[in-house]
Image (cartoon, helix red, strand yellow):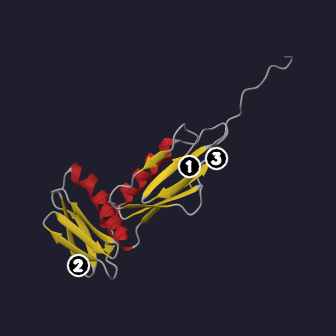
Amino acid sequence: MSRIGRKPIAIPAGVEVKIDGSQISVQGPKGSLERTLPEEIKAEIQDGQVLVSIGRETDRSKAFWGLFRSLIANDITGVTDGFKKELELVGVGYRARLEGSDLVLEVGLSHEVRVKPDEGIEFQVPASNQIIILGIKKDQVGQVAHLIRRIRPPEPYKGKGIRYAGEVVRRKEGKKTAAGA
């Protein structure tokens, strides 16, 4: 049995959760999200909490129980606080800037890279070597951060590239020259 699935999800003040059959919608100060539950998973609201349970016990329902409890909890967190990922640019001449809502990156390529934000995503550039990605969907924020990092991933010899804030890049030693040459 799922230990995560059993935990109730508290509904904070200012958040409205509606359950209509297999549809669950969460509305809060930052926006609204909807999710469709599989037929094996049931959700109900009791005493200001969302309880997720198994409707019909199968291997699939056991696997989905904790997953959908976590997804609903992430939806509630997203509409109240939102999610944020921070990226750092490391390298001489590596810069980021905003042009309107687009993110423009100069990362040692022959051209600038322009990244348009998906719907519900916002970019902030507090310094020329920092990028902050904000949104209410946790998976979407993580996906956009991954796509930006993939433009120029950190390389192991000099450590240059785009990395997550606080990410440790393992460095390799360069080539060694011959002893007598």
- The residue sitting at 31% across, 59% down in the picture is 66
Labels 2, 1: front one: 1
Locate residue 46 relative to residue 94 in the image: left or right.
Answer: left
In depth, the one of 135 and 55 nearer the eye is: 135
Q: In the picture, which quadrant includes the C terminus?
A: top right
Percent coordinates x, y for residue 170 in the rendering: 63, 42
Give the class, few, some or many, for how many residues have Cα within 10 Å of label 1's Cα (few <14, many ≥20): many
Q: Is residue 83 visible?
A: yes
Instruction: Identify the mark nearer the N-term, 2 or 1.
Output: 2
Residue sitting at 25 percent across and 66 percent down?
52
- Judging by the rendered image, the residue that carries numbered circle 2 is 46
Secondary structure beneath dot 1 equals strand
Give the spatial CA distance, label 3 vs label 1: 15 Å
Report how far apart the C-alphas of labels 2 and 1 lie in the structure.
Answer: 43 Å
Q: Which mark is residue 163?
A: 1
Q: Closer to us: mark 3 or mark 1?
A: 3
Please identify the residue farthest to the right as the structure is shown: 180
Determine whether the residue tagged by mark 3 lies in a helix, strand or loop: loop
Closest to the observer, 128 or 165 = 128
Determine crowd level at label 3: few under 14, some 14-19, many 20+ residues with C-alpha closer than 10 A.
few
| Horizontal side of residue 170 vs 150, given as left or right | right
Residue 131 percent location from the top left of the image: 52, 57
Residue ID for mark 3: 93
Give the secondary structure at mark 2: strand
Tell me: 9 left or right of 84. left
Q: Which mark is residue 18?
A: none
Q: Who comes first in sequence, dot 3 or dot 1?
A: 3
Q: Position of residue 35 (x, y in %)?
A: 23, 61
Residue 1 at least partly seen: no
Compared to residue 111, the image places residue 133 above or below, namely below
Q: Amino acid at mark 3?
A: Gly
